[in-house]
Amino acid sequence: DGGITQSPKYLFRKEGQNVTLSCEQNLNHDAMYWYRQDPGQGLRLIYYSQIVNDFQKGDIAEGYSVSREKKESFPLTVTSAQKNPTAFYLCASSIGQAGKETQYFGPGTRLLVL
Amino acid sequence: AQSVTQLGSHVSVSEGALVLLRCNYSSSVPPYLFWYVQYPNQGLQLLLKYTSAATLVKGINGFEAEFKKSETSFHLTKPSAHMSDAAEYFCAVSADTGRRALTFGSGTRLQVQP
């Protein structure tokens, strides 16, 4: 089955620690995205990547970093600079012309701070 | 710039009653519009999308939405609510501005009473 997988489902971070969230897709989609979801705020874009080895900052990129070394993978690192990392993180992918594509979402990773 | 406003963070209906979830958008270019549904601790699932073809769009699970340019609205409806419709619903807009990302509303939580 084609789809988007995210791991782990739950992740715990200690103070000062960097953690990495995994996102993999086998849909052969060009573009991939990371969103952060907080209660009552909808989804906010952290980073997106249109092609391999290229990515762009979204609206709330501070304290996060990404890489796109393979088409299938778009990992997100939450660094110690992100002071309020507790949230639900969603990865998505899409194919097609910018502004006209449909995004498909993974099941999410919930990050909690110890 | 584009934005989405969802009126009503919580909507409660009785089983069998009409469901109406409101979405208004702002976009400087012709938009693509989407409704997604999210069940607790899960990713987002696409319900339906408007891509400038028919203004009345039918989606999964008996939902439909009508694009009204004059009112800048894209309200989601379902004639008869079912208990399984209880979830959070997000309206999103995408526009061909070169930036590949969706702008989401803050969401509406639908509660279905027996």
Image (cartoon, coloured by chain):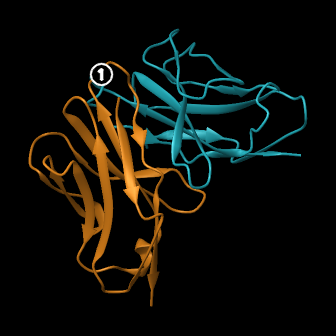
Chain colours: A cyan, B orange
| Residue extending furthest toward the left | B54
Q: Amino acid at mark 1?
A: Thr
Helix, strand or loop at mark 1? loop
Question: In the rendered view, would you say B39 is above or below B74?
Answer: below
Q: Nearer the viewer, residue A61 or A12?
A: A61
Left or right side of A83 for A56: left
Q: Which residue is mark 1?
A: B97
Report how many numbered discs are placed on residues in the image: 1
Give residue A103's quadrant in the image: top left
Crowding near pointer 1: few (<14 within 10 Å), some, many (20+)? some
Left or right side of A103 for B20: left
- At 18% from the left edge and 52% from the top edge, which residue is drawn? B71
Give residue B23's quadrant in the image: bottom left
- At 52% from the left edge and 43% from the top edge, which residue is drawn? A43
| Residue extending furthest toward the bottom | B114
Can residue B35 be seen here?
yes
Can residue A2 be seen here?
no
Q: Position of residue A83 (x, y in %)?
A: 79, 33
Q: Position of residue B1 (x, y in %)?
A: 35, 29
Question: In the rendered view, would you say B103 is above or below B48?
Answer: above
Q: Position of residue A12 (x, y in %)?
A: 82, 43
Q: Nearer the viewer, residue A9 or A37?
A: A37
- At 51% from the left edge and 48% from the top edge, which residue is drawn? A42
Left or right side of A67 for B27: left
Q: Nearer the viewer, residue B3 or A11?
A: B3
| Residue extending furthest toward the top | A53
The numbered mark 1 sits on a residue in which chain? B
Q: Position of residue B51 (x, y in %)?
A: 18, 40
